[in-house]
Image: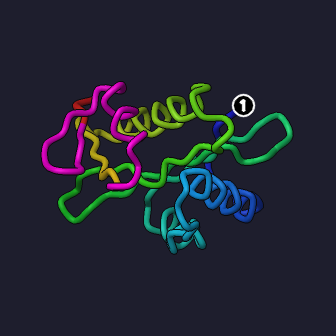
Amino acid sequence: MKIIKFEEKYRDDMIYMVLSAKNALGRIPKLNEDLLDIQANYLDQKQSFWIAIDEFDRVIGCIGTKIDEENQLFLSRLYVRFDLKRKGIGSKLLKTAEDFARENGYQEIHVHLGIDYLESHSFYTKHGYIEYRELYRRKQL
């Protein structure tokens, strides 16, 4: 497995992976519109987006970062292929985003947790994120 910056040739595979991950959680798969155009919604906005690919060049995970109006860095769209969870892929994607934050002078990173994603609550706690308001966590870098 390797983590690379998003490339357009992986778009459809990434979308399929995200929808499959949501479906595996028993949710009606609905795609977040920002994922339809990573270039316009992340890269052209000076945001970041990475994908994890396997040895067959298939997308098995993704994560993005966004900067809000207060110049705070937020994690966005961390997904791992449903049948590959708990194999370190999410942790490696998270580390990539945290390293990016440090390299760009951020001392804190934030994440908004969806109410339906109970796995994410324990995942971020395990990685040192603390709750500072309902459904929000942050970590000092």
Residue 60: x %, y % from top left: 68, 43
Provide the secondary structure element on which disc 1 rests. Answer: loop
Residue 3: x %, y % from top left: 64, 37
Residue type marked 1: Met
Number of marks in picture: 1
Q: Residue at 13%, 48% (x, y): give it.
A: 133
Q: Taking 113 as reference, is 47 left or right?
A: right
Query: In the image shown, does 1 or 99 lie closer to the viewer?
Result: 1
Q: Taking 66 as reference, is 63 left or right?
A: right
Residue 132: x %, y % from top left: 13, 43
Residue occupied by mark 1:
1
Q: Taking 4 as reference, is 98 left or right?
A: left
- Identify the residue at the far right of this view: 56
Q: Residue at 18%, 39% (x, y): give it.
A: 131
Residue 134 falls within the magenta-colored stretch: yes
Which segment did they paint magenta?
A: 115-138
Q: Could you tell me which quadrant the C terminus lies in?
A: top left
Q: Residue at 30%, 30% (x, y): give it.
A: 125
Residue 114: x %, y % from top left: 35, 55
**Residue 47 occupies which quadrant of the picture?**
bottom left
**Residue 52 occupies which quadrant of the picture?**
top right
- Identify the residue at the far front of this view: 26
- Identify the residue at the far left of this view: 133
Q: Is residue 62 above or below residue 42?
A: above
Q: Is residue 50 above or below residue 92?
A: below
Q: Residue at 35%, 32% (x, y): give it.
A: 122
User: How dense is the environment of label 1, judged by Cα within 10 Å: few (below 14), some, or many (20 and up)?
Assistant: some
